[in-house]
Amino acid sequence: MADNTHDNTDYTVTDKAKMTLDHAPAGLYLPGIDETTHKEAVRLCARDFLEHHVFFNDRGFHNHLNHHLLSVFSLGAPAKRLQEVFDQNKEILLPSHSPMDVDVTTENFTEHFSNERCYPNYVSFFQRELDAAGDNWKAVACDYFFDPRVFPLGMSGIFHPFIQLGYGLEFESKTIVATALAQTCVHSSTFKTMFSEHVFADICTEELEDDNHGLSLMQILDKMRQDPLSISMEFSAVPSSKVSITDAAERLAIKYSNLWSVPTTKEGISAKYHELLSVVALVYGSMTRPGYKLLLHFAVMHCVTSAYFLPIYFDCLPIERQAQILKAHCAVVLATFALHGSPELYITPEISSKDTHCTVSDLQNNVNNQWLDVFSGAIASNDMHVPKVVRTLWRGSLLYSFPSKLTFDNDYTLPPPVNWLYLARITVDTIDFSSFRDPQQQAKEGKRFWTFGMVGHDKFWDTYPKE
């Protein structure tokens, strides 16, 4: 049964859960983060581990509590706000449950895939495996994630297992990593063949065009829109529910991800990550047709928030696997793009205007505090995804303070500049929907939420509100 006996003064939960948040990424140097907020973040993550299931309903919707906690914590939220985030999230979560009468071992750990009742069994298994690995535990965790039997599950569910593992690696928490690997194992697979061993190997063995340097992502998006398979896709209000649409999207993603070249060098990985993050951000902010209300898409938003973690994975992987995880992420991004109708991009002057670069040092010294204002809005947001988006966009702004060292041929179409601060600000200003209140009532109140659906199809816009 769930261990729900803890109150807000109980710090024994930290030891019970073996919860640590050891690493201090760049975000943890922001104003407002101190020993007190760190202690509270550890305690609340421990309570989540002890008290809640990995899904919050019987439809496989993911528990986001530690995502929400750690994102606002790393943006400088005070201890009071951390407690509020915990209290809000816990109201919608399922309690943890007792393990099944199953002993998960290295010999049989694949036998209970996609069985969410085995989640606590998998957690215990991976805790033992990581403890036994000693100082090599992150490498062991990545070996499990890259196991060809596990990897298709890890890249499913609009990146949620990938994101959960990213948080564990970022904060160097073996407990969170164990939950991420367990979540991966009990997850269902989104894709039929894209991450099967032979198909993914083909994706990583690129068929290059244009003098062997491949196509850019901007060129690939253009080609996908013009592909007869994309043009012939029928409209659906819920495209993920139509097998014909999901199959077509997966076929398009396999075809075109194969044309994006990722060099297996440090400079090549860095340059291609720059490109991917920029393109994902541009797609996120540029799908609104002129004359219509601003649209921010739920699935594309997850492409943004998951991209934050790629450099964290890079730090734990040899160069060949860095290229593979970058290619895998790109493939899911392209599948998401295709699934929603391969929309045109309407890149406004505001989105591509000069960004306001702001370093960690600037923020600590309260120099140029425009980002601090956005962080405050993200911390206060009652949508659990907004602070994660803002964190990723700030990474983009920091990243582009250091130009790529890799050069491309003139016919390789790089994305235009991105105003990361502008995208972060419109996210905070637009999404005022609460993840924790009745959605119908909020809709009546005119609250704005993430958009769903095939925004690349003309029929979508027949019912979407104009400005």
Image (spheres, helix red, strand yellow):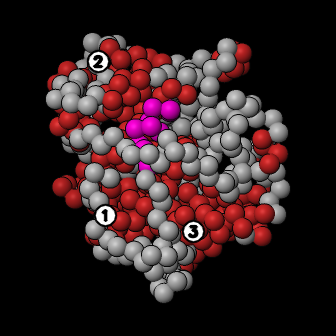
Q: Earlier in the sequence, mark 1 or mark 3?
A: 3
Location of residue 456 with respect to 383 vertically, above or below? below
**At label 3, which amino acid type do we have?**
Gln
* Crowd rating for badge 1 (residues with CA inside 10 Å; few <14, some 14–19, many 20+): some
Location of residue 328 with respect to 356 vertically, above or below? below
The C terminus: image quadrant: top right
Q: Magenta part of the protein: which range?
A: 418-427
Q: Is residue 115 left or right of residue 109?
A: right
Residue 219 is labelled as 3
Q: Is residue 124 left or right of residue 119?
A: left
**At label 2, which amino acid type do we have?**
Ala
Disc 3, SS:
helix
* Crowd rating for badge 2 (residues with CA inside 10 Å; few <14, some 14–19, many 20+): some
Q: Which residue is under mark 1?
A: 404
Nearest to the observer: residue 310 or residue 115: 310
Q: Which residue is under mark 2?
A: 79
Q: Position of residue 389 (x, y in %)?
A: 45, 38
Residue located farthest toward the bottom when viewing the structure as drawn: 211
- Give the image quarter of residue 310: bottom left
Q: Are marks 2 and 1 in contact (CB under 8 Å)?
A: no
Q: Is residue 165 left or right of residue 442?
A: left
Q: Is residue 150 visible?
A: no
Location of residue 434 with respect to 192 vertically, above or below? above
